[in-house]
């Protein structure tokens, strides 16, 4: 019993299972689901009731059916229910946060440096190269010694794996820069710059070993050998191994920021520009790998593209076109360019690249699109891509061409341009013009401002003395009448008012305000014009007088001293009707009520007296006998010629024409005398009417006389009158009336059995397939054919004419007056079937004329004999179907040349009589003599090169000059030579007018320079030269000659240009030729060289009337001066004259159109002449800059743009032809410096001005300021287009200029300054400026492609800036792509209220953020033990032992852990108990949870026992678990990423099984980053990093990593939302937090 008492068993104490967690961490409230019995429990107390009745527990609720849901629902419906629940939950979270331990301080220590001897250092590097030795063993310290290239060589020699080498170099660099970290100016990336220089110099050293053989020397004794590093196999392998190792290191360095990306990429761009072709392959490969880094910045991409294109061109030249397209190496630079263009097209916004490589770039970009794939979908995609590339390329080309001032948009046709085209149209009106086809006015029926402007121009053209031709007033009236008729028809159709009133108003305004109309010298022309307008009903004389009276016009009456301009208009404008009331009203206005006889009445009486005296037979008197009338007979009618138009027209139309018609109708049977009287009256009348320009009366008189033309002389006289003034009839639009009258006369003569060749010829010309009916036209052609066949019958055996016809020589002594007619008839009868009988007659006649001086000594006898021969030839002409003219032309151009050259002066006098007589009577035309004789002799005289030739041509040249003078210049008659009277002179005048019509006038102009060459030919006699000068000057005064010149100025210009450009013309003849041209274009007094002083007067001719002629003159003058500059003897004088002229040009051109026309004058000149004008224009612009007023800057800048803008456009047009071959004119460097300085100053002023203007809302000055900025940018582009020698001062100014351009671009991106035109233009200008600032790629100083580029933060840009503008500004910033670890990261702090305040961006610290290798055993300050790394409740803790402190992310523990379903997969009850009253995260799905909660285990005990056994076994055989969190923990990586996705740390060997753990600072194994929410408990890694751990421990580590039973969640502000996959933070001295932007 005692023994039994001694051996009392202890009281059994019920204990919970070991795996069961406590219900509370700190409070002793038991275990979850475990309720052991206790002595004081109710069931342990024995009471009578319990014994008798058993233990009965009182119900918690009095009624079993009671439910609390009603009360709960009622409470929840109260207003403060949610607030109360929120307060409860807040208290729960607050108490929970108080119980969470804080993150410990960082325990990271950088491996220190030690100095080792050679053997130990070599052993250390050998261990570093050994992948089996973990880095944690080597990470205590690193050796100190080798640096730079030697250190890289050492790593390569030991073949250290790249990740381990990177770790070592990172630690090495961190120790190197450790002493600088505490300095205020410390830059964490400075060592990256230094290391980038080390790497680039190392690669450059290796590339330098690749060289090309030099060109062989000509010295044969020197033997050259070349051995490159790549030619030998061993050397090549060593070089490739070292270069490959260097590239592998560089790849990691670049990705992690260990080398400064900006420094490295700048070096790469520089190498691409300076390398040779052998090195280019390697450099291109580097560029291909790192191209993405360059494409974010234009400063890198543009020079890289330029270098690639240059290498592409060099390769294509070396390899050859047929082969290089198949060589990949040769195309790689082009491929780089293609990728760069597609990614950053703005990099190709460079005029220099466009000029040098534009075509090649286009070829490269479009080359791959030539062959489309067969797949339809792929083909569609390729087509879309091609369209995108083509559009982008077109945009780039357009912008480059715009900066080069190519393809300038044409001006909108202004008033001056429109006037010039209208002048050309009006001056082209001829006798063959159909006025209905002349479209001067717009096809509108309304009176618009355009119509008023056109009508004003038309009226001025018709009366100005600067234009020529009597037809102009008639043309103006006809064009207005045609328009009025169309407008009136349209008004009738639309029931609109008639345009007559509006036309009346416009005409009155022109009379009232036109300066040209108010000039006294233009009064006759104005009267003639308005007389036609009154005649056609376009201008009402009565309304005109009424309006003058209504507005109280003073000075209309001659009784008033000060006269109005309208007094003369009322006095001169004629009336075509005999309206008594209108005449009386006019008389009262001009002379008053009481005047009985006016001066007009006296003038009319005097005019009638003169007409009666001149033509008495018209009034029943006897005809005047005596000497024939000369051509100056009209002087006897002085009163008629000097009278106002009113009296002239009244006398001729209302008095003379009715008398003449009455006279014609009163004649009886036609007789010879009657016809002669009519002929005399008709001829004298038409001459006088032509003198007073009464062409309407001439036409009426001619058409009326045709009805009574019964004889050939009278019919010929009428026909010649009609032909002489045919332009006027066309302008009157009366050609149909003329054709009808001629057809009627032809029908009349045809009915009489007679045909008239002259009549048929004129009828065909007038009709011109327009006016006659088709049947009448067929009849006319049939009559012409019949007439020709009658005179020249066809015969198969034509008669043969002997070469000598002696009867022609006998005609000289024939006494019979009818001998010429008889001889002509007999010859025709004999030889009419011979085609050349007329030619031989003419040849024999000339031979006979040569004998007359021998046969007759008296001059009068000779000329009388010559007239006999002329009469004979005139009869021969009447027997020829097409006249004698063609035969004579063929003779002069054929064998007649020698005959003419042999004529003596006396013989020439005889021949001249014959020629003049034939021309007077129409048998020969003046144009035939000029073209077949005179022009030929002139050309021969111009080409005389010896005195012998001059002597042989002296007689001939003198004779043809005399003949030319008689044909075109002399009007008098009765000099012994035809014409002998006014009737023959009329025939000569008619043939003379044909010379000044096309196509004959062009021949005259083309041969006109020959006269100048004769004048300057020193071999010819002085008399001949002087005679040629007189002829040239005299004909230039002829009105019809000037009319012909202004009808076709281009023909005049081409005639002289061809001669001036000919190599056969000496330079000293250019000035006389230009002077002769000037005399033709201007008044005879303006005959001298052009100089600057005369430009003022010449510029006054920049009116529409003289501008075309002035442009020809100035163009040839400039060419003359340019040629003078090419000669040494005249260079100085020509330069001085050209400088003065160029300066005067830019000082006198005020309007835009003047600038355009001056630029057109200066086209097609040499670069030297163009350079003179460019220099003068730029100087003028600088002067305008200096003249601007500083008081009102915006108005001053507006005037500056207006003045200098036209000069800029003028200069652009001058330079445009030279841009095609890129050989621009040379600009004076001093001019460039002054212009650039002025530009920089003005742009700086405009920058400040625009910055102030945008602060003023709704300011109208902003738009004006933007226009000024655009102009300055365009001017800067023009300046940059010329080669420039950049001085240091210019470079300094350029730096400020780029800053100001950047400010201007920013001003125009948003707000009040937003301008969609200004911003891209300024940005393109900025690119152009940056590209043109010179940079030396081979300089010894570091190459900085970002120099002068703008620098600002993108965060400073306005938020409302358009995204495309912001994107383009981003490419201009001198930043490369940010490291992904710190991209979009900033430091943040919290203010007093707890709000987050952003600070500076996070800066990459690649040398400080080293790889995490784990803690060295024994370094834990808290000591080790069985529960190392766990808290008191068994939960793991976090150690802050990595290089990137968790404090940067404001990390905190949440006490949550992940419970994996694998832990209790066999015991659902245990798993359920683990989830009770515990804040955990569960790695299970919704379906699994539903399955677990709805099932009850039938074998709980067995499951619990097995669970406890398994749990203890695992606990005993396992190492401490790997504490991890987030998605970068090792356990999570094993669960989520699976083993196939694991990647080794760069700090471990690629083959090390003990270091497969991924660095927390290196999630991508390349980037040195730390992410928010990522903390590693380094104490748990001791077993894994010891290097001597057993296999079991490794297995345990693996099993622990796979089970992932306890994972602690560390909550950070960035980890909860995004996971922060790529995050780095800057180690700071104070606690900060990282937050995404």
Image (cartoon, rainbow, N blue to C red):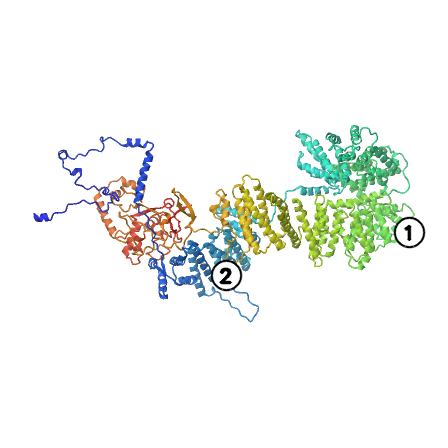
Q: Is residue 240 above or below residue 3?
A: below
Percent position of residue 1432, x then y: 26, 48
Most foreground residue, 475 or 742: 475
Residue reaching furthest to the front: 1191
Please state if 413 lies on the left or on the right of 963 as rendered. Answer: left
Q: Earlier in the sequence, mark 1 or mark 2?
A: 2
Q: CA distance from mark 1 to mark 2?
A: 101 Å
Find numbered disc 2 in the image and state the secondary structure of the residue it sits on: helix
Find numbered disc 1 in the image and state the secondary structure of the residue it sits on: loop
Tell me the residue that label 1 is attached to.
Answer: 858
Q: How many marks?
A: 2
Label 2, residues with CA under 10 Å away: few <14, some 14-19, many ≥20: few
Percent position of residue 1155, x then y: 66, 46
Residue 782 makes an appearance in the image: no
The numbered disc on residue 278 is 2
Please state if 976 lies on the left or on the right of 738 as rendered. Answer: right
The numbered disc on residue 1231 is none
């Amino acid at each position: 019993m005692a023994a039994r008492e001694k051996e009392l068993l202890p009281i059994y104490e019920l204990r919970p299972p070991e795996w069961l967690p406590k219900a509370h961490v700190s409070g002793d409230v038991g275990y979850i689901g475990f309720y052991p019995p206790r002595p004081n429990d109710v069931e342990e107390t024995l009471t009578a009731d319990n014994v008798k009745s058993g233990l009965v527990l009182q119900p918690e609720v009095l009624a079993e059916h009671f439910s609390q849901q009603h009360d709960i629902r009622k409470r929840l419906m109260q207003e403060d229910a949610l607030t109360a629940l929120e307060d409860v939950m807040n208290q729960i979270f607050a108490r929970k946060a108080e119980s969470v331990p804080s993150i410990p301080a960082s325990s990271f220590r950088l491996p220190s440096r030690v100095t080792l001897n050679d053997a130990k250092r070599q052993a250390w590097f050998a261990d570093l190269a050994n992948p089996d030795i973990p880095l944690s063993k080597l990470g205590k310290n690193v050796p100190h010694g080798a640096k730079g290239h030697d250190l890289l060589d050492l790593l390569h020699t030991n073949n250290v794996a790249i990740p381990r080498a990177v770790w070592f170099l990172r630690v090495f660099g961190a120790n190197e820069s450790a002493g600088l970290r505490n300095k205020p100016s410390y830059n964490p990336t400075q060592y990256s710059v230094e290391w980038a220089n080390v790497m680039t110099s190392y690669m450059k050293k290796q590339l330098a070993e690749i060289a090309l053989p030099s060109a062989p020397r000509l010295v044969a004794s020197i033997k050259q050998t070349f051995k490159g590093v790549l030619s030998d196999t061993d050397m090549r392998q060593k070089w490739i191994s070292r270069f490959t190792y260097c590239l592998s290191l560089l790849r990691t360095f670049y990705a992690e920021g260990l080398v400064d990306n900006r420094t490295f990429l700048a070096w790469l761009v520089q190498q691409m520009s300076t390398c040779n072709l052998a090195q280019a392959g390697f450099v291109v490969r580097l560029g291909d790998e790192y191209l993405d880094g360059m494409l974010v910045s234009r400063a890198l991409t543009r020079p890289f593209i330029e270098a690639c294109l240059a290498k592409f061109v060099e390769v294509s030249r070396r390899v050859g076109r047929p082969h290089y397209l198949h060589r990949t190496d040769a195309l790689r630079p082009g491929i780089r360019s293609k990728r760069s263009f597609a990614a950053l097209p703005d990099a190709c916004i460079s005029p220099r690249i466009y000029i040098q490589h534009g075509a090649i770039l286009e070829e490269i970009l479009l080359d791959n699109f030539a062959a489309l794939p067969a797949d339809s979908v792929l083909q569609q995609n390729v087509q879309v891509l091609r369209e995108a590339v083509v559009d982008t390329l077109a945009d780039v080309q357009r912008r480059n061409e715009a900066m080069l001032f190519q393809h300038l948009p044409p001006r909108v046709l202004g008033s001056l341009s429109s006037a010039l085209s209208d002048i050309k149209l009006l001056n082209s009106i001829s006798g063959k013009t159909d006025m209905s086809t002349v479209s001067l006015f717009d096809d509108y029926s309304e009176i618009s401002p355009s119509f008023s402007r056109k009508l004003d121009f038309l009226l001025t053209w018709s009366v100005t003395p600067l234009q020529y031709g009597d037809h102009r007033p008639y043309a103006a009236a006809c064009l207005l009448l045609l328009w009025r008729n169309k407008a009136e028809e349209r008004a009738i159709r639309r029931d609109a008012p008639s345009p007559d009133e509006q036309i009346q108003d416009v005409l009155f305004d022109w009379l009232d305000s036109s300066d040209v109309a108010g000039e006294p010298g233009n009064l006759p022309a104005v009267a003639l014009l308005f007389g036609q307008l009154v005649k056609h009903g376009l201008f009402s004389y009565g309304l005109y007088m009424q309006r003058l009276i209504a507005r109280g016009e003073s000075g209309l009456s001659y009784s008033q001293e000060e006269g109005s301009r309208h007094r003369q208009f009322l006095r001169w404008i004629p009336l075509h009707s005999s309206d008594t009331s209108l005449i009386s009203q006019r008389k009262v206005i001009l002379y008053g009520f009481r005047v009985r006889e006016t001066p007009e009445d006296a003038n009319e009486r005097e005019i009638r007296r003169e007409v009666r005296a001149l033509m008495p037979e018209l009034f029943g008197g006897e005809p005047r006998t005596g000497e024939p009338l000369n051509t100056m007979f009209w002087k006897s009618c002085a009163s008629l010629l000097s009278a106002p138009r009113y009296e002239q027209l009244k006398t001729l139309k209302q008095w003379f024409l009715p008398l003449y018609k009455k006279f014609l109708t009163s004649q009886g049977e036609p007789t010879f005398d009657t016809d002669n009287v009519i002929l005399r009256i008709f001829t004298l009348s038409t001459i006088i009417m032509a003198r007073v320009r009464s062409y309407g009366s001439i036409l009426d008189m001619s058409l009326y006389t045709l009805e009574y033309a019964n004889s050939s002389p009278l019919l010929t006289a009428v026909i010649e009158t009609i032909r002489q003034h045919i332009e006027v009839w066309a302008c009157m639009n009366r050609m149909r009336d003329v054709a009808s009258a001629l057809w009627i006369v032809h029908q009349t003569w045809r009915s009489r059995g007679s045909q008239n060749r002259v009549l048929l010829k004129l009828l065909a010309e007038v009709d011109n397939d327009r006016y006659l009916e088709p049947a009448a036209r067929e009849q006319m052609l049939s009559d012409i054919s019949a007439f020709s066949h009658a005179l020249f019958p066809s015969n198969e055996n034509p008669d043969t004419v002997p070469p000598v016809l002696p009867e022609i020589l006998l005609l000289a002594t024939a006494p019979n007056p009818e001998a010429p007619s008889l001889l002509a008839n007999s010859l025709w009868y004999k030889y009419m079937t011979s085609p050349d009988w007329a030619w031989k007659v003419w040849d024999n006649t000339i031979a006979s004329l040569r004998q007359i001086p021998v046969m007759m000594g008296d001059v009068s006898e000779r000329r009388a004999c010559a007239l006999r021969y002329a009469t004979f030839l005139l009869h021969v002409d009447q027997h020829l179907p097409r006249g004698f003219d063609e035969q004579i032309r063929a003779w002069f151009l054929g064998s007649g040349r020698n005959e003419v050259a042999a004529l003596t002066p006396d013989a020439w006098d005889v021949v001249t009589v014959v020629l003049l007589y034939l021309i007077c009577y129409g048998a020969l035309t003046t144009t035939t003599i000029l073209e077949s004789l005179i022009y030929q002799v002139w050309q021969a005289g111009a080409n005389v090169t010896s005195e012998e030739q001059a002597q042989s041509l002296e007689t001939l040249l003198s004779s043809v000059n005399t003949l030319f003078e008689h044909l075109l210049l002399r009007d008098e008659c009765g000099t012994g030579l035809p014409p002998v009277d006014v009737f023959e002179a009329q025939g000569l005048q008619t043939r003379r007018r044909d010379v000044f019509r096309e196509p004959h006038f062009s021949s005259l102009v083309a041969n006109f320079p020959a006269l100048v060459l004769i004048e300057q030919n020193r071999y010819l006699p002085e008399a001949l030269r002087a005679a040629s000068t007189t002829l040239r000057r005299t004909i230039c005064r002829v009105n019809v000659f000037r009319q012909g010149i202004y009808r076709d100025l281009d023909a005049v210009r081409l005639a002289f240009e061809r001669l001036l450009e000919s190599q056969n013309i000496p330079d000293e003849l250019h000035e006389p030729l230009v002077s002769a041209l000037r005399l033709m274009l201007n008044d005879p007094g303006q005959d001298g060289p052009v100089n600057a002083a005369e430009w003022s007067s010449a510029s006054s001719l920049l009116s529409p009337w003289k501008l075309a002629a002035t442009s020809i003159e100035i163009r040839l003058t400039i060419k003359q001066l340019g040629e003078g500059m090419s000669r040494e003897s005249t260079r100085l004088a020509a330069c001085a004259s050209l400088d003065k002229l160029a300066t005067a040009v830019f000082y006198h051109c005020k309007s835009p159109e003047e600038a355009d026309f001056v630029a057109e004058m200066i086209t097609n000149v040499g670069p030297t002449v163009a350079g003179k004008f460019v220099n003068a224009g730029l100087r003028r612009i600088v002067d305008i800059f200096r003249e601007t007023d500083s008081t009102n800057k915006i108005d001053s800048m507006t005037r500056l743009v207006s003045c200098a803008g036209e000069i800029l456009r003028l200069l652009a047009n001058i330079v445009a032809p030279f841009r095609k071959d890129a050989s621009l004119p040379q600009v004076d460097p001093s001019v460039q410096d002054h212009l650039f300085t002025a530009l920089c100053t003005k742009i700086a002023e405009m920058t400040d001005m625009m910055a102030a203007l945008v602060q003023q809302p709704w300011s109208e000055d902003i738009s004006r300021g933007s226009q000024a900025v655009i102009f300055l940018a365009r001017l800067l582009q023009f300046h940059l287009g010329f080669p420039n020698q950049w001085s240091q001062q210019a470079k300094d100014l350029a730096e400020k200029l780029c800053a100001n351009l950047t400010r201007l671009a920013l001003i125009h991106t948003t707000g009040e300054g937003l301008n969609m035109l200004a911003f891209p233009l300024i940005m393109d200008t900025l690119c152009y400026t940056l590209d043109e600032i010179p940079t030396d790629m081979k300089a010894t100083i570091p190459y900085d492609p970002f120099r002068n580029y703008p620098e600002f933060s993108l965060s400073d840009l306005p938020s409302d800036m358009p995204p495309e503008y912001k994107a383009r500004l981003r490419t201009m910033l001198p930043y490369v792509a940010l490291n992904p670890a710190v991209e979009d990261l900033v430091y943040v702090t919290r203010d007093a209220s707890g709000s987050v305040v952003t600070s500076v961006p996070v800066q990459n610290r690649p040398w400080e953020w080293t790889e995490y290798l784990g803690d060295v055993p024994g370094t834990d300050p808290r000591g080790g033990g069985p529960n190392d790394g766990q808290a008191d409740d068994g939960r793991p803790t976090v150690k802050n032992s990595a290089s990137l402190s968790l404090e940067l992310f404001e990390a905190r523990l949440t006490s949550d852990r992940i419970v994996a379903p694998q832990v209790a997969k066999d015991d659902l009850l245990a798993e359920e108990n683990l989830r009770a009253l515990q804040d955990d995260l569960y790695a299970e799905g919704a379906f699994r949870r539903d399955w677990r909660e709805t099932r009850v285990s039938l074998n709980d005990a067995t499951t619990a026992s097995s669970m406890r056994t398994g749990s203890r076994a695992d606990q005993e055989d396992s190492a401490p678990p790997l504490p991890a969190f987030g998605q970068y923990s090792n356990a999570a990586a094993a669960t989520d990423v699976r083993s196939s996705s694991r990647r080794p740390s760069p700090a471990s060997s690629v083959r090390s099984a003990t270091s497969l753990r991924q660095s927390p600072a290196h999630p991508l194994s390349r980037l040195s980053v730390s992410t928010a929410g990522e903390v590693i408990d380094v104490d748990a890694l001791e077993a894994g990093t010891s290097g001597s751990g057993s296999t079991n421990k490794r297995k345990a580590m693996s099993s622990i990593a796979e089970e992932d039973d306890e994972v602690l969640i560390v909550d950070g502000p960035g980890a909860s939302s995004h996971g922060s996959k790529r995050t780095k933070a800057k180690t700071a001295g104070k606690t900060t937090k990282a937050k995404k932007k």
